[in-house]
Image (cartoon, grey):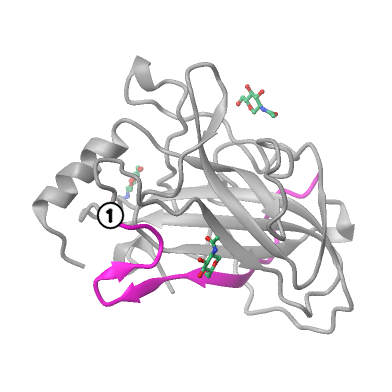
Amino acid sequence: MKLPLIATLLCNACFTTAHYTFAIISHNDGPLSDPWTYIRNVTTGWAFSEDNINNYEPYYDLYDDNVRCGRGAATRPAHKTLSVNAGDRLAFFATQRDHNMVERLVGVYHEGPGQAYLSRAPHDDLDRYTGDGDWFKIGSITTKSDSKWALTEMPSSCGTDRWLEMNFTIPKTTPPGKYLMRVEQLFPLVPRFNNTQFYIGCAQLDIKGLGGGTPGPMVKFPGEYSIWDPCGYSS
Ligand SMILES: *[C@@H]1O[C@H](CO)[C@@H](O)[C@H](O)[C@H]1NC(C)=O
Ligand SMILES: *[C@@H]1O[C@H](CO)[C@@H](O)[C@H](O)[C@H]1NC(C)=O
Ligand SMILES: *[C@@H]1O[C@H](CO)[C@@H](O)[C@H](O)[C@H]1NC(C)=O
């Protein structure tokens, strides 16, 4: 995808000042959760400057365990597990931590695909599950045309045309049980090798329902992505 240089510059200006993560969830269009209630809390990453120290940095390393749930999150259980029915809709909201350590909504402003996966905890022991098992994809937000991603308009100087949420539906036939739900959003815009930014989060869900489905194909994280995939992204 070719973009005018001016757009790239604007975007650079944007992502050196801020990134985001997914800390807030809403269930069937209900109220927004408190940050990091149902989603596993991530640790902050390397910061560009002192000024930026409290912001979450994107994740780059496709081969590290942190690509499962975000930096430091695979071994930090969420405060709560959300009870949902198969067929329900879950929306993940992009947030950013301000200088008072408060998470605020910023919207998804990096152009790129978004996807969601589920992985059932062995023996439904969710708090202790680190996501090293099998995952299956339940949804994908891809392109709206040959030259545009569906997720986000080009940020007009970190602008206003942002998707606030990425929402996904739990498949109706998902076998009931306790699952990690992993959402990721990728930012492959900067045209350099080994440079795709990952924004990742894992919610803890207790899924009820009649089941009946056989989820698949199964993938692992790390494992699903190769650095040689075009744009670091395999569809
Ligand atoms: C999330 O983790 C950060 C440290 O990485 C901590 O300061 C903050 O209190 C945690 N928030 C919640 C709601 O657990
Ligand atoms: C929910 O997701 C669908 C499919 O990606 C999308 O068309 C819709 O706009 C989203 N809803 C909101 C409120 O963002
Ligand atoms: C990709 O980037 C990471 C740092 O983010 C680096 O450790 C790794 O060696 C790079 N891999 C290649 C093949 O360039």
Residue sitting farthest toward the left: 5
Q: Is residue 183 left or right of residue 207?
A: left
Image point (67%, 37%), residue name: 36
Name the quarter where the N terminus is drawn.
Answer: bottom left
- The amino acid marked with disc number 1 is Met
Residue 130 lies within the magenta run: yes
The residue that disc 1 covers is: 154
Image point (78%, 75%), residue name: 174
- Residue 102 against residue 96 in the figure, above or below: above
Q: Quadrant of residue 150?
A: bottom left
- Residue 98 against residue 26 in the figure, above or below: above
Given residues 170 and 123, the one toward you in this image is: 170
Image point (72%, 53%), residue name: 30
**From which residue to which does the magenta span run?**
127-154
Residue 199 lies within the magenta run: no
Residue 168: x, y in percent?
61, 66
Name the quarter where the C terminus is drawn.
Answer: bottom left
Given residues 124 and 171, the one toward you in this image is: 171
